[in-house]
Image (cartoon, rainbow, N blue to C red):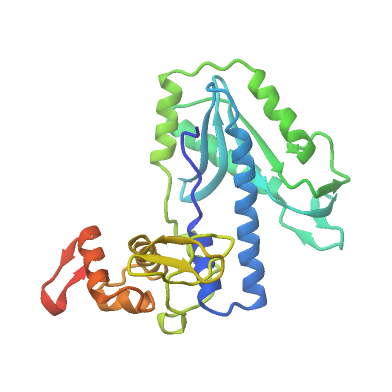
Amino acid sequence: MPFKSRTVPVKLRIMRALNSRMVLTEKEKKYYFYLEKGYQGELMFDSMTENLHTGYLIINDVCLEMNNSEFQNDTLLISQGTIFLFEIKNFEGDFYYDSNKLYLASGEEVKDPLVQLKRNETLLRQFLRSLDCHFPIESWVVFINPEFTLYEASRDLPIIFPSQINRFLGTLNRTASKLTNRHIKLAEQLVSAHIVDSPYSRTRLPSFDYGQLLKGVLCPNSQCLGFMAPKGNRTLMCMECGYEEKMELGLLRNIEELKLLFPGVKITTNLIFEWCGGVGSKKMVGRVLRENYHVMGKKKYTYYE
């Protein structure tokens, strides 16, 4: 059981919604698929680290700030005497190193995760020192995809290849690690410092406005994200995959999605009824809002926070 579980990144949540509600350009779609693939790779690594014994505290997806610089850590493992930092990459295909630069087999240069790893390690060390913590850090880039191949890489690079992951984690599992309140306090400090919605999580997004987006309730299945339709008075069913859920839950998800896409928007019954594509009724929408949000204003000036 991880000390901090992974959640869907804000940017990916936004791109999932936009992909269903508007027409993305090919460049925007490529970026969306890149984010989705990266997240799925992180989930794959999570399923492996969950098998570690209780001598490790697993902190997934923690965004920290040090010296006015934010840095995203895919996975941290706190052990008795070492903090392990993992940068997870779901790259697929053939790659090679040349003059300390990473290239696709086609010769196109790509961003080297080792550079990101080094930056994160430096900032993490500084952050830990600010907490008066001086544990050594062992950092690794983990290539999670079994279809990944890297040529001409030095053997001393901090890289874990797909065929090495189980052995690496197996070694950790066989290593004794006794945790104390000091370790738990450190984990709590890291999690409490996590930046939930960083300004950087809204960079590189397509431009969009409320009027151009398709209205309706999206399916919660990330592999589908089709639109849902009423099935009776209390149930919604996805028109693409057949997934069913209570109408109230679907309305709540859609309200939170609107707030995600348009931070600071004034939530009203009429707005949510329109945003949900007329699903249910205004009476039901009003009840869901009253039961789950704070009522602000009166009569025709009523809104919800």
Out of 86 and 305, give the one closest to the viewer.
305
Q: Residue furthest bottom?
A: 211
Out of 48 and 206, give the one closest to the viewer.
48
**Residue 4, relative to residue 222: is it above or below?**
above
Out of 221 and 179, give the one closest to the viewer.
221
Left or right: 56 with respect to 93? left
Write the residue at 27% across / 72% down: 266
Left or right: 247 with respect to 94? left
Q: Position of residue 137 (x, y in %)?
A: 60, 30
Write the residue at 48% across / 33% down: 128
Q: Residue furthest front?
A: 232
For residue 107, say whether it is visible: yes
For residue 161, say whether it is visible: no
Q: Residue furthest left?
A: 298
Write the residue at 34% across / 62% down: 252
Q: Position of residue 279 (x, y in %)?
A: 36, 74
Query: How many numbered marks have been drawn onto this rendered protein structure?
Result: 0
Left or right: 24 with respect to 107? left
Q: Position of residue 22 (x, y in %)?
A: 53, 79
Out of 23 and 110, give the one closest to the viewer.
23
Q: Position of residue 119 (x, y in %)?
A: 61, 45
Write the residue at 72% across / 35% down: 165
